[in-house]
Image: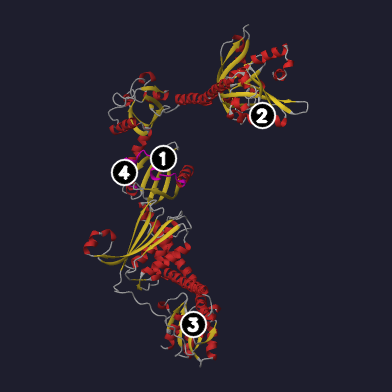
Amino acid sequence: MTYPCCNISDRDHSPTSANGNEAQLRTIVDALPACISYVDADLRYRFVNRTYESWFHLDRRAIDGRYVWDVIGQAAYQKAKPYIERVFQEGIQVAFEMIIPYAQGSRHVSGTLIPDINGHSQVQGYYALIVDISDYKRTEMQLRRSEAALAKAQEIAQIGSWEFDVTTQTFDCSAEMFRLFGLDPSAPPPSLSQIAQFFPTDDWAQVQRAARQLMATGEPQPFAGHITLPNGESRYLEGSSEAFKDDQGAVVRLLGTAMDATEHKQRIDQLRLLESVILHANDAVLITAADPIDSPGPRIIYANPAFTKMTGYSSAEVIGQTPRILQGPKTSRLSLDRIRTALKTKRQIRIELLNYRKDGSEFWVEMELVPVTNATGQVTHFVAFQRDVSRRKRDEHKLKEQAKLIDIATDAFLVRDLNSQLLFWSRGAEQIYGWRAEEVLGQNVDRLLNPEPSPQVQTAWQTVLSQGEWQGELLKYTKASEMLTIESRWTLVRDPTGRPKAVLSVDTDITERKQLEAQFLRAQRLESLGTLASGIAHDLNNILTPILGIAQILPHKLPGAEPLTLELVDILAKSAKRGAALSKQILTFAQGSASDFTALNIRYLLAEVRRFTQQTFPKSIAIRVDVPSDLWMIMGDATHLYQVLMNLCVNARDAMPDGGVLSLTAQNLYLDESMANIKPHLGLNSGSYVVVEVADTGVGMPPELIDKIFDPFFTTKEPGLGTGLGLSTVAGIIQSHRGQLQVASQVNQGTRFTISLPAAQITSPLPEDAVTLLPGSGELILVVDDEPQIRYVTQALLESHNYRVLTACDGVEAIAVYQAHAADIDGVLMDMRMPNMSGAIALAELQQLNPQLKAVMTSGVVSVNELPNREGLTIHAFLPKPYDVEELLKALHTALHA
């Protein structure tokens, strides 16, 4: 169509070229429904057809010579501009499809621009063919929506559709059909041979027979068969098909649907299997309607053959009746009430019941009543499974008569059947476990005494069934949920034919005995820990002594040192003293040594705790301290109280793994008689107290744990992360200080420990003792220690304070050195524990040589109360390791002037 447009355009500009052909071509072009135009290189119109005129409501003479954007509008021109520029720049034909916002209204168009190239290969204009496809696009969109809705409906219903062209032998199917076969919907439709591979041979033969029948008769044909998906999964399909004929009556097209009926077929197969099981079951099965619950009660709608054999009633005789036809004068009213409650609450129940046969004879049944629900969860029926347990009940009666003989025993005697149902429960069992016999008989004893499955019970069952007896220890629970350690002896009971029928177990409560054994083992472990701790403390003190001494020498050796250096040296000294305090705690734990109570202000301990926690705790934990400046004094052991505070802070840190706030507060509290009576929960008598609180915002504790946290060896931490001695030790220390310790905690809210300590009767803070060094006067001191570092540092300390020093590495060398310098040695500093010869023996030997010899005994593990007391031995001062220069000089001064 563009070629004749080109001709018309050319001749439109050359009037002499007009002829009949041009008029014919113009007539044809005007008759076309597309917009056809010619635009020159200046983007001015030189030709438009009649459709163009109708689009823009302009006469072609009004369009001729005007710019493109004047006619179609600036917005439309901007949309078309890239394609127009491409025609002029590249000289190629350009096609496009878009929505163009013409001034007269937007249209969805399909267009082609063809360049007009002159003899010099220059583009002198272009031809435009524009077709309005808006209606087509709307129709196409509606069709797509319809197809999408159909596909979605098939997907929701899981029904696929297929079509077979008989003439072309081609197969087409919907996306859901692809999914039913496990295929990619974007893949080409499978061929018949490919489809056949999904079916087993017999099922595919059935499909082919249905197809031939459909072709022959033209009537709809159902089909069903198994298929195997590409992933190996087996599915079951059901469907139907119809035939479509041409005008001559020949079938030209087959159309059908298919659906995945796998689950439906499985349910059908299960129902058939269940029906077969019920028909051949030995237990009686009754099915009733769910309503009415009240009189006359649910009606029976099914009874299996076993019910007829058990009761004598045929199925026809009981259908339409209620189960009450089986009840009689001895049927338990309590049992019937329980059944009625289960019916009303739509709950499952297992119960034993005395029933009556058609001939009036009694029989016992174990019945399980199960509600049956529909797809909406509504109970529609009840199924009762009944087993004749008359023989078992007779055996139980005999066992009960025999059991009276063992009711006086304190052990628990239990008899259970092979399903763990309790047949006998002795008086001793009532006393041990807390349940009365009528509460537990008929229940599963394993679930009663072990809420969670127990591997030990399973082992006991396997052993007693295979070997006839079993003996061992089991953990069981009482009615009050208290866990007991039970020594249990099981014996298999057999019937007259030798077949197992029950298990007799005799249980002895050995909980208290096991606790005593555990306490004895813990005591042994603590004794071993004490021995180990003593050795650790000795070695630790030997390590800390030279560290502390060097830290005190360095400032004198570095007179021009920077303040930072001196501060680091001071930190080193304080750290060594802190280690000494830790060593003292270890010795206190190991030896139970007495605490040294002094007047102290706990404010300074809290400051030290804050400093330590800020340096070592995670940055995600904010530490807040609130202590008044006028806090009262207390009498206590600073080391032990520091241990208490650090233990509580570490527990608080562990309770805040994701961060939080650790609060340390202290306040003065005075309670008069009336206030002490008003607040008995504080556990405090009237008087003055210093109250310290350690609180966190951590995970908290449930109420059932709070009463246990102070028990020795109780811990909530994972194995290996806690000993369970922390809070027990804390409670012991606070008690030794005549104080009170209280705890409050809420899960996910945090925990608060409150310590109340009696205030000391001191009106003003004690003045700090001024550090007074007591240098020597040139005295000669014999230093005896097996640690060379201690000898070296002690010698340096003494020599820097006007003492002269001789050293020895053990007692043997000390005696030799003393004998060589006996006239000059004024005193001896002797380590208590050394190899070859102990310090006590060596000192005794020296004092035999010179009874006036002044002696200072030092030790890293022995306290002043544990110094040897032997004849011929005089100790003038005791110096515990590690010691600083003041303590060293003071001890020597005391000894030399004794």
Rounded to the nearest whole Å, what is the CA distance between mark 2 and mark 3?
110 Å
Residue pushed farthest bottom?
823
> Mark 3 packing: few (<14 Cα in 10 Å), some, or many (20+)?
many
Provide residue 28's location: percent of width, then percent of height.
67, 13
Return the x and y of residue 553 as percentages of the image width and height: 51, 79
Circle on res. 436: 4
| Amino acid under disc 2 | Ile
Q: Which residues are magenta?
A: 433-455
Residue at 47% across, 56% down: 719
Real-space Cα separation, disc 1 to disc 4, in angstroms: 18 Å
Residue 830 disc label = 3
Q: Amino acid at mark 1?
A: Ser
Residue extending farthest to the front is 16
How far apart are the alpha carbons under marks 3 and 1?
74 Å
Dividing the image into 4 quarters, which one contains the C terminus? Answer: bottom left
Which one is earlier in the sequence, the residue at label 1 or at label 4? 1
Q: Are marks 4 and 3 in contact (CB under 8 Å)?
A: no
Which is closer to the viewer, label 3 or label 1? Answer: 3
Q: Earlier in the sequence, mark 2 or mark 1?
A: 2
Q: Which residue is mark 2?
A: 84
Residue at the extreme left: 674
Where is mark 1, residue-wise? 420
Q: Nearer the viewer, residue 756 or 403?
A: 756
The correct choice, above or below, for 545 with respect to 278 in the image is below
